[in-house]
Image (cartoon, coloured by chain):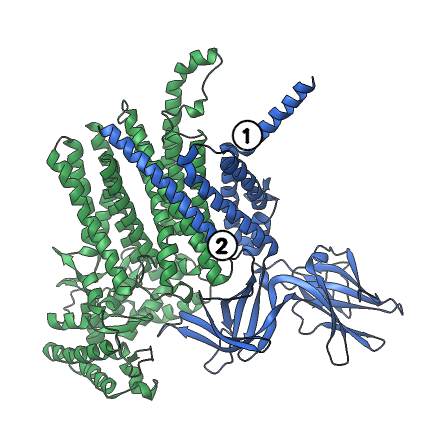
Chain colours: A blue, B green
Amino acid sequence: MPHVGVSCVIKAVKAFYGFLASYGLSCVLFFLLIVLTLLGTLEQVEHGLYATQKKYFESMYLVHEFFGRIPVLLPGVRLLLILLFVNLVCGAMLRLRGGWSRVGVYIAHFGILFMLVGSFITYEYSLDGHLTLYENERSNEFQSYRDWEIAVTEVGADGKGLQHIIPAKRFEHLAQEDTATFTFPKDTPRYELSVTGYSANTTPAQAGPGMPQGARVIDGVYLKTLPPEKEAEQNAAGAYVTLRDTKTGESREGILWGFARSPWSTTFDSQTIQVDLRKQTWQLPFTIVLDKFTRELHPRTNMPKTFMSDVTRIEGDKQQQIKITMNEPMRYKGYTFYQASWGPSNAGPNTRLFSTLAVVKNPADQFPLYACIIISFGLMLHFLVRLVQYLRQEQARDT
Amino acid sequence: MTYRCASMSVLAPVFLACLASLSAEAADSTTGVKPPAWTQESVAMFARLAVQDEGRIKPVDTYARFKLLKFSGAKSLRLETGRRTATEWLMDCLFAPEIADQYKLFLVESGEAMDALGLPHENKRDRYSFRALEPGLQKLYLLAQQYSRVDPKERSVVESQLVNLFHNIYEYKELTQGPRILALIPPARPDTVEWMTQGEMMQGTVAAEDIGPDQTRLSSQVTALTAAKANPLQLQQSLQAVASTQESLASARGEYGRIGLEVFYYNLSFAGFPVFYTLTLILYVLGFLSLAVLWMRPNSRGMALFVPLFLCVPTLLLVWGITLRCLIRMRPPVTTLYETILFITAVAVVVCLAIEYMNRQKIALSLASVLGALGLFIAHRYEVMEGSDTMPSMIAVLDTNFWLSTHVTTITIGYAAGLLAGAIAHVFVFAKLLGLRRDDPEYFRTITRMVYGVTCFGLFFSMLGTVLGGIWANESWGRFWGWDPKENGALLICLWGLLMLHARLGGYIRDYGMNLAAIVGGMIVAFSWFGVNLLGVGLHSYGFTNGTFTGLVIFYAIETFVLLLGIAAWMWELGQKAPRLQPDVVNGSASAPAKADAGRVVS
C-alpha cells in the first residue's frame, strides 16, 4: 500500500510539473497578459498612468469592471509574470524539447528569463526620483516623484538638527479613523508622533457649513480629500498629526500638507520640532552643481531641438565638468542622471532657468541590453535553422 | 478558371479606390481667372530657392507644395487655363495676390461651416476663393477665437474646421505680403542657425552681426523681385540674381547641398505622373492586372517570367524613393508616421517577392501588387490628411540617428511582418470561402507555412525592436519600461506572436487557427501603429495624430467581418468532417475536433 501512495504522489507531482511546463499554461498566460495589457492601456485615458500601473501591472489580482458595471476578478500582471517565469524555467529550460536543433530557442528563452529577473530586481531594488536645480544651485540629494515620507527634525541652535524619517509605507495605509504612533529619539524616546487620516490627494480648506460631517478641524482648517490626479506627481498628500511630549504630557495638533511652503513646527520646553510631509528624499554620495542649462529650439519654431545641462560633480576635493543631454545620461557610482525637463515654461530671454534631472539607481540598469543581445542571438539562430529546413523541404518538394 | 476571376473581383475595389485617389490629386479651381504668365525659367529657379521653414532648410518648391496641400487638400490647382503647380501658385500669391485671391483654394469640408459663416454654398464639401470667403471673415475671426479656447479634443467637427480655416486664411494672407516674409537670407555668422526674412532685416529685428554686405545685397535683390513682378522677364532676371547670391551664401554654410535632390525627389515624373509615388502606385496596379492574365494563362512561360520582373520595377522605385528621403534628410528611413507607411509597404512587398522566389506559388506575388498599391494609397491619403511637411525637424528626444535606425526600423519591420501575415491569412480565408483549390490541401498548407514563417520573422523584429525601444527609453527617460500606451502596443504584438507560436507548438491551433490568429495579429498591429496614438496619453506624444479614427474603424470592421467569415468557414468544414468521426466516437477514441482543422502541424 505505501508503494501505491508514493506512486500516486509521484504521479501527482509529475502531472503538476507537466502542467507548469505545458504549452497550455504558456498560452493561457500570454492570453491573460494580452487582455491585461490592453485593459491597462485603455484605462490610462481615464485614470492616468500611475493609478493604472498600480492596479493592473504591479498587482497580484484586481477587479476590472467590464463596460463600467460588470466586475470580474482578474490576475494582476505581477502574478502572471511570476507564473510565466516558473513556466519558462520548467518548460523551456528544464524540459529540453527537440534536441540541439532548438538550441536557439533555449538561448532566447534564457534571455527572456534574464530580462524577467532584471525587471524583478528593478521593481524591488531600484530608486527613482529627480534633482531639480536652478543655474548655480547645488545639491547632494534627490527626491521621489510620487512617494512621500514624514521627516521629524529636532531643531538645534544652529537651525539644523537630528532628523527622523518615517517612510510612507508606515502611514499611507491609514484610514480616517486609524492612527499610527512613532516615538523618537530612538535611544531615549521622549516624543510621540501620532499620524491619522492620511490621504493621497488633499487640499487644506476653511472649516464651514459645506465641510464633510465628522471632519477634523484644527485652527479653523480641515483637510479636504480630493480624487487622485491623472498625473500622480500632482497629488498633494495630507495627514493630521498629534505630537506629545511624554515627559510633560503636553501635546499639540497639526495638519501636514505635501505642498505646504514650510514644515509644521511646534516647541516644547524651548525645543523646536519640525514635522514635514515631503517627497521621499535620498542622499547622493557626491554633490551636483548646475552650471548652465541650455535649451535649443529648431530655428523659427517652438520645437525643442536639444536640452543640455552643464554640471559639475563634486566629490571630496575632486571636481569634474560633465554635459548631460537628451539620450546622453551621466552614469556614476550606480546612479544615472538623465535630462528630464526644464522650466519655467514661460521663460523669457533673461529668466533664470531650472533643469530637472531624473535620477535612477538601478542595479539591473543594463540587464535589458544583455537580455536583448541574448534573445536576438537565440531567435536569429533558431529562425536561420528553420529557414534552412524550410528551403530544404521546398527543394525536396520541387525535385 | 472561375475562382481565379473571383479572387480578382474581390480585390478590384481596392484598385478602383486607389485610382480614384489619383484623379482627386488636383484641386479644381476653375473660376475663369487668367493666371500670370511666369516664364518656365522663373518657375524652375524659384522652385530651387532655399527657404527656412519649420526648423529646416528646404526648397521653395517643397514649401509651396505643403502650403497648398494644407489649404486645399491637393498638390496642384486646376484652372480653366490648365494645371497650376504649387510653385506657380506660390508665385501668384507672392507676386499677384489680387489674382490668387480669386482661386478656389480653401477646402471647406462641410456646408455647416459655411452656414456658420453666413456664406452661400452649393456643395457640402467644396473649395472657395479668398474673395468668396471675405464677407464672412469677421464672423470667422470671432468664431475661431471662441473655439480656440475649447480643448481640441472637445471641439466638434465644424468647430475644428472653422479654427483650421481661420489659420489657413491667416497664413495665406501672410503669403500675399510678398517674398519679404520668406526666410531666404542666410545669416553672416556661421553659428547663427536662424535665416532671416527681408522684412526682419528691414525692421531691424535681427542681430547686426548677422548682416554682412552679402546679406544686404540679397535683401535688396529680394526687394527687387516685388518691383519686377509686373514684367515676367524682368522678374526672371531678378530671380536669377537672388538664386545666384543665395546659393553662394547657403553653400558656404553647407546648407544648400541637398536642395537640388529634394526638388528632384518631388518633381521626378514620367508621362506626367510623379514617380514618387503616383507612378509607383499605377505600376503596382498594372502588375496586378498582368497577374490576372497570368492566373488565366498559367502555362505562359513568358508571363511567368515577366510579371515578377515587372513587379520589381515599382518595388525598386519605392525603395529608391525611401533612399532619396534618407539622403535628403541624412536620416534613417523611418522618422515620421508617414514614413512608417512607406517603409512598411516596402518591407511587405520585398518579403512577398522573397517568398515568391522561394515557393513560386503566385500567392505572394499577388499580395505584393495588392499591398504595394494599398500601402501607397494609404500613404497618399495620410499625406493629404496631415497637410504638412513629411520630412519635418525632429524633436529633442528623437534627434538621434542611432536609435531611429535601430529601434524604429526594427519595430517597423515587425509591424510590416504582422500586417503581411494577416494579409496572407486573408488569401486562406477567401480561398476557403470561395471553394478554391478544394482538392488541393497542399495549397492551404503552403499558405499556413507562409503565415508561420512571416510570423516568426515578425516576432523576431518585434521583440528586438521592443527591447531596443526599452533600452532607448532607459537612455532618455531613465526607465526601461513604463507601461506607456505605445510600449504596450509593441508588447501586445510580441505577446500575440508568442501566443500563436506556442499554441501551434502545443497543437491547439493548426491551419485555420494560425490563419485566423494572423488576422487578429494584423488588427493588433494596427492598434499599436495608429490606435494608441488616438488615446492621446503617454510619453510618445510626438506620434499623436488626428483623423485616423475613421480609417481604423473601417479597418477593424472589415477585419472583424473577415474573421467571422473565416470562423464560419471553419465551423462549416468541421461540420462536414464530423460524420466521418462517428466510428471513432463509438469506439471511444475520437480525436479532438479542435485539432482536426484540416492538416498537419507545419514545421
Residue beneath disc 1: A18
Residue A239 visible (yes or no): yes
Residue A211 as seen in the image, left or right of residue A8:
right
**Residue at position x 26%, y 56% from top?**
B322
Please state which of residues B502 and B50 is positioned toward the viewer in this rendering: B502
Mark 2 secondary-structure assignment: loop
Name the spot of residue B189 as percent of width and height, x first.
31, 83
Please state which of residues A42 and A214 is positioned toward the viewer in this rendering: A42
Q: Is residue A179 above or below residue B521?
A: below
For label 1, the crowd category at 10 Å Cα-Cα, with few meaning under 14, some 14 to 19 and many 20 or more, is some
Residue B484: image tag: 2
The subunit carrying tag 1 is A
Q: Is residue B380 above or below residue B244?
A: above
Please state which of residues B348 and A138 is positioned toward the viewer in this rendering: A138
**Residue at position x 61%, y 53% from top?**
A124
Q: Quadrant of residue B563?
A: top left
Mark 1 secondary-structure assignment: helix
Image quarter (top left, top right, bottom left or bottom right) of the C terminus of chain B: top left
For label 2, the crowd category at 10 Å Cα-Cα, with few meaning under 14, some 14 to 19 and many 20 or more, is some
Q: Amino acid at mark 2?
A: Asp
